[in-house]
Amino acid sequence: MQLLASGGALEIKEFLTSSDEIISNRFTGRHGSGAGFLPAHPYFLLFTILISQEERTMALFEWKGEFSVSVSRFDDHHKKLINLINELHEAMLKGKQQGVIGKILNSLADYTKYHFAEEEKLMVAYKYPGLVEHRAQHEAFVEKVRDCITKYEAGKLAISLEVMNFLRDWLKGHILSTDKKYTAFFAANKVA
Ligand SMILES: [Fe+2]
Ligand SMILES: [Fe+2]
């Protein structure tokens, strides 16, 4: 039974046979949402370690050639969005202050809106047939991010691995399955 999703994961067997050793050897401090340094029960400490390691398992989100939509400015926008998601992840891991995380979140929201507006402007200009469906996806994401920010600022949401995975997976999925659909259309219209 594996407790964590990715490579190098700590397994329940290891926990049951050597939890004392794990605690003494691996517990090095507070990361992300972990609440380290408390004189707590060993199981609590182990839980803290698991959360910390899980948060660290999200790999850096890297732009790859397969993400190219063949419109250079939109590739640049996507790279910038990926950088902002990585910046947010880094801030979460380092347990940065709410103000710092809030600022990155708002930059991500603003740049996302700017990018979506630019894509839609080009689609309108060239009468792209998939505009309505594409715009609906943009709007749903903007709404979701706005909701995240509102809850975060009200102290009702922590920037967790779950939130990070959602942002990364949504952007990746949108580029690969929705943005890529306009590649051939804009190429035929000589937009690069
Ligand atoms: Fe896009
Ligand atoms: Fe898009």
Image (cartoon, helix red, strand yellow):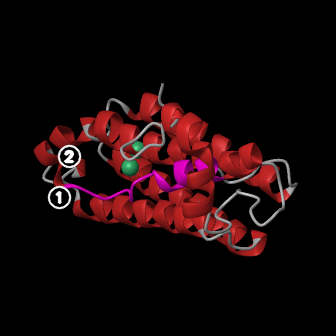
Q: Quadrant of residue 179?
A: top left
Question: The magenta stretch spans which residues?
Answer: 49-64
How crowded is the residue under tag 1: few (<14 C-alpha within 10 Å), some, or many (20+)?
few
| Residue ID for mark 1 | 192
Residue at position x 36%, y 44% from top?
7
> Cβ–Cβ below 8 Å for labels 2 and 1?
yes
Q: Is residue 142 visible?
A: no
Q: Secondary structure at mark 2?
A: helix
Kind of residue sitting beneath label 1: Ala
Residue 156 lies within the magenta run: no
Q: Depth check: 1 or 152 in front?
A: 1
In x, y percent, where is residue 92?
A: 62, 63
Numbered badge on residue 186: 2
Residue 53 lies within the magenta run: yes
Where is 9 relative to 30, above or below? above
**In the displayed structure, does residue 1 sit left or right of residue 101?**
left
